[in-house]
Image: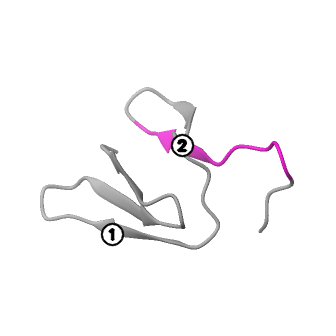
Amino acid sequence: MSLASGEAAQVYVPASGTWTSMASPRNVHTATLLPNGTVLVAGESNSTLEVYTP
């Protein structure tokens, strides 16, 4: 799947049943499940990190 310019990647939040936008758009990234259950999303040229609590 690829997003067109201006589209946002969405993250589903099961606890609330809602979707939220990622703070920074990414094209080449990794998502890593951390031992505490959160998900670390990192990568792309903007060098930002985001942590999600599912």
Quadrant assignment, res 35: bottom left
**Residue for point 79% across, 44% down:** 7
22, 36: nearer the viewer: 22
Q: Position of residue 10 (x, y in %)?
A: 61, 44
Q: Amino acid at mark 1?
A: Thr
Q: Which residue is mark 1?
A: 32
Q: Is residue 12 above or below residue 3?
A: above
Q: Nearer the viewer, residue 18 or 8?
A: 8
Q: Is residue 3 left or right of residue 36?
A: right
* Magenta span of residues: 5-14
* Element marked by disc 2: loop
For label 1, the crowd category at 10 Å Cα-Cα, with few meaning under 14, some 14 to 19 and many 20 or more, is few
Q: Where in the figure is residue 54, as x and y percent of width and height? A: 34, 45
Please tell me whether residue 18 is drawn above or below residue 50 in the rendered image: above
Task: From the image, give the main secondary structure of the stretch colored magenta.
Answer: loop
Q: Residues within 10 Å of mark 2 (few under 14, many from 20)?
A: some
The residue nearer to you, when weighing 8 against 14, is 8
- Whether 37 is among the magenta residues is no
Direction from residue 39 to residue 9 in the image, left or right = right
Q: Secondary structure at mark 1?
A: strand
Whether 53 is drawn above or below 19: the answer is below
- Residue 42 is situated, as x and y percent measured from the top left of the image, at 40, 63
Residue, x 43% and y 26% (percent of image)? 16
Q: Three-letter amino acid code at disc 2?
A: Met
Left or right, residue 11 beside residue 33: right
Q: Residue at x 79, y 65 (%)?
A: 2
Q: Which mark is residue 9?
A: none
The percent coordinates of residue 19 (x first, y second) are 57, 34
- As drawn, which residue projects farthest toward the right? 4
Q: Earlier in the sequence, mark 2 or mark 1?
A: 2
